[in-house]
Amino acid sequence: MAKRKASVDAGRCVACGECMNECPRSAIRVKKGIAAVVDTELCVGCALCAGSCPVGCIEIMEVV
Ligand code: SF4
Ligand code: SF4
């Protein structure tokens, strides 16, 4: 069964940190104040981060 994971469009991320505050698994972090990065080992694809992103640059992708 496919799993879902968050994916950040780093080019559009403004590094605001909202996603980090929402994630229940601490799976998304803003690296070096530049862009958010997802730890796919921890991410459960709940989409809370995507809902919190003011610029809509987080997508939930199906992965195999
Ligand atoms: S989809 Fe859920 S678990 Fe994954 S990074 Fe976003 S808030 Fe965290
Ligand atoms: S909420 Fe969106 S813009 Fe803000 S750090 Fe996260 S991915 Fe980047």
Image (cartoon, helix red, strand yellow):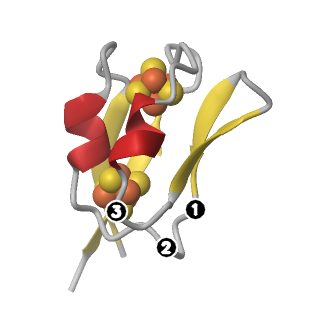
- In this picture, residue 48 sits left or right of residue 7: left
Choose between 8 and 25: the one closer to the eye. Answer: 25
Distance between mark 1 and mark 3 Cα atoms: 13 Å
Mark 1 or mark 3, whichever is nearer to me: 3
Q: Which mark is residue 39?
A: 1
Residue at screen point 58% across, 16% down: 11
Residue 9 seen from this side: no
- Dot 3 beta carbon under 8 Å from ligand 1: yes
Residue at screen point 32% across, 71% down: 44
| Quadrant housing residue 34 | top right
Distance between mark 1 and mark 2 Cα atoms: 6 Å
**What element does badge 2 sit on?**
loop
The quadrant of the picture occupied by the C terminus is bottom left
Residue 12 x, y percent position in the rendering = 50, 13
- In this picture, residue 15 sits left or right of residue 45: right
Q: Which residue is mark 2?
A: 42
Callouts 1 and 2 close, C-beta under 8 Å: yes
Residue at screen point 49% across, 61% down: 26
Callouts 1 and 3 close, C-beta under 8 Å: no
- Asked if 21 appears above or below 1 in the picture, the reply is above
Badge 2: few (under 14), some or many (20 or more) residues near its Cα, within 10 Å? few
Q: Residue furthest bottom?
A: 1
Choose between 20 and 50: the one closer to the eye. Answer: 20
Residue 61 seen from this side: yes
- Dot 2 beta carbon under 8 Å from ligand 1: yes
- Dot 1 beta carbon under 8 Å from ligand 1: yes
Badge 1: few (under 14), some or many (20 or more) residues near its Cα, within 10 Å? some
Q: Which mark is residue 47?
A: none
Q: Which residue is mark 3?
A: 24
